Amino acid sequence: MQTISSLNPNENWQALINGKKGKCLDLGCGYGADAYWFTEHGWQVDALDYNDEIKFQHPMLNFIKADFRRVNLITLGRYDLIIACFILHYFNNNYKLNLIKKLLFMLNKGGILYLKIFEENFTPQMEYLLKDAKIERYEQTDDHPPDGKHVHHIVKIICQT
Ligand SMILES: C[S@@+](CC[C@H](N)C(=O)[O-])C[C@H]1O[C@@H](n2cnc3c(N)ncnc32)[C@H](O)[C@@H]1O
């Protein structure tokens, strides 16, 4: 089972956002470590997940319990940063491509779409759609039942509009 739900933020966000503040959407926030980091750093954060496993609560964090396939995401508004980490592997290629296009549309000018996906789910069509993005590949070792110790090949995508 491919699953990474982290208790640590996915990124050294301070280095990426360089002191900026704004509005952030964390799609499939899981435990909420990224959403919490941004809330703590003065961002306005919407964090969406259909499970309520969120462990990092904050009075200023707007957690939305919803299935994003059933929400008209466009109605949430525009964002300066959209994070979607380890959620795209649940969906087929068409859904993934349409979702990425929608998320790009939802960015304010200069906004960032930040994605992480398992290498085996990163299709040529996705790579073409994201051809102007910064793409980085790395390996991450995990150790949890039922697989025991195993390595994930991860693609990190940073797309600035
Ligand atoms: C593998 S976890 C990753 C969590 C977090 N993004 C991280 O990087 O630690 C995937 C998360 O996406 C959520 N998710 C998957 N499909 C979803 C959907 N259709 N609507 C809302 N949440 C969804 C799951 O509940 C889970 O919390």
Image (tube, grey):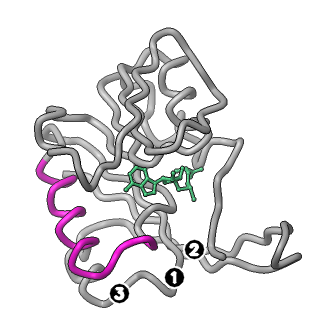
CB of mark 2 within 8 Å of CB of mark 1? yes
Q: Distance between the residues labelled 2 and 3?
A: 13 Å
Which residue is under mark 3? 123
In the image, residue 48 sits, relative to residue 142, either above or below, namely: above
Outermost residue to the top: 59
Tell me which segment is drawn in magenta.
89-105
Q: Residues within 10 Å of mark 3 (few under 14, many from 20)?
A: few
**Left or right: residue 69 compared with residue 57:** left
Q: Which residue is drawn at 51% across and 82% down?
A: 119
Label 1 residue near ligand 1, CB within 8 Å: no
Q: Residue at x 12, y 42 (%)?
A: 74
Percent across and percent down for residue 141 are: 79, 72
Label 2: which secondary element: strand
Q: Residue at x 13, y 40 (%)?
A: 109
Q: Nearer the viewer, residue 135 or 46?
A: 46
Residue 119: which numbered mark, if any? 1
Image quarter hosting the N terminus: bottom right
